[in-house]
Amino acid sequence: MLKKLLFVALAFSLTNCLILNPAGATIDREKGSVVASRITDAAIQTDLINSTVLAGRASVSILSLLASDIANIDAAKYYVKADVDQCVNDIQGFKGFLLGSTITNIISCQDLKTDGYFTGDPFPSF
């Protein structure tokens, strides 16, 4: 009985990502498509506020529309939520308003690593 229980627990832990990630039941990870939209939204908001303050009218740069591509976000992979939150907070925070959204994106969001049991960088994190 103990062997069967141990086998079931091991099988569930190995297939955890395969079952929970597509269902969206991840606790501390976000899908790449969600990360890409959050980073792009933060860059657009920062550009709108900066242009309104500096030029008196709202405008958005093309680079802020490409913010997720600049950050090298893969829409099919998963990212650690805390790292993504830090990246978005940097873009929307003082650093983003001082340096601009594109430079802040290059500085803060280039080190986002994918997360997953089989796809983690450089090794999976458990």
Image: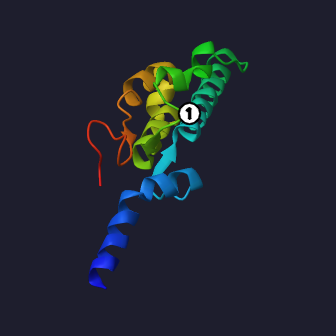
Q: Secondary structure at mark 1?
A: helix
**Front residue of this view, candidates 22 and 79:** 22
Towards the viewer: 106 or 54: 106
Residue 14, horizontal then vertical, whole percent: 36, 58
Q: Residue at x 46, y 24 (%)?
A: 72
Q: Residue at x 40, y 43 (%)?
A: 83
Quadrant of image for the N terminus: bottom left
- 55 vs 15, left or right, is right
Q: Residue at x 40, y 65 (%)?
A: 12
Q: Is residue 125 above or below residue 106?
A: below
Report the residue marked by disc 1. Answer: 36
Residue 25 visible to the viewer: yes
Q: Position of residue 46 (x, y in %)?
A: 59, 29
Res. 100 in view: no
* 82 in relation to 32, above or below: below
Q: Position of residue 50 (x, y in %)?
A: 60, 23
Say which quarter of the image contains residue 43.
top right
Relative side of 48 to 30, left or right: right
The colour scheme of the drawn protein is rainbow
Residue type for callout 1: Ala
Frontmost residue, 102 versus 111 = 111
Give the crowd class for mark 1: few <14, some 14-19, many >=20 residues within 10 Å. many
User: Percent from the top left, x then y, of residue 32?
Assistant: 52, 37
Dividing the image into 4 quarters, which one contains the C terminus?
A: bottom left
Q: How many marks?
A: 1
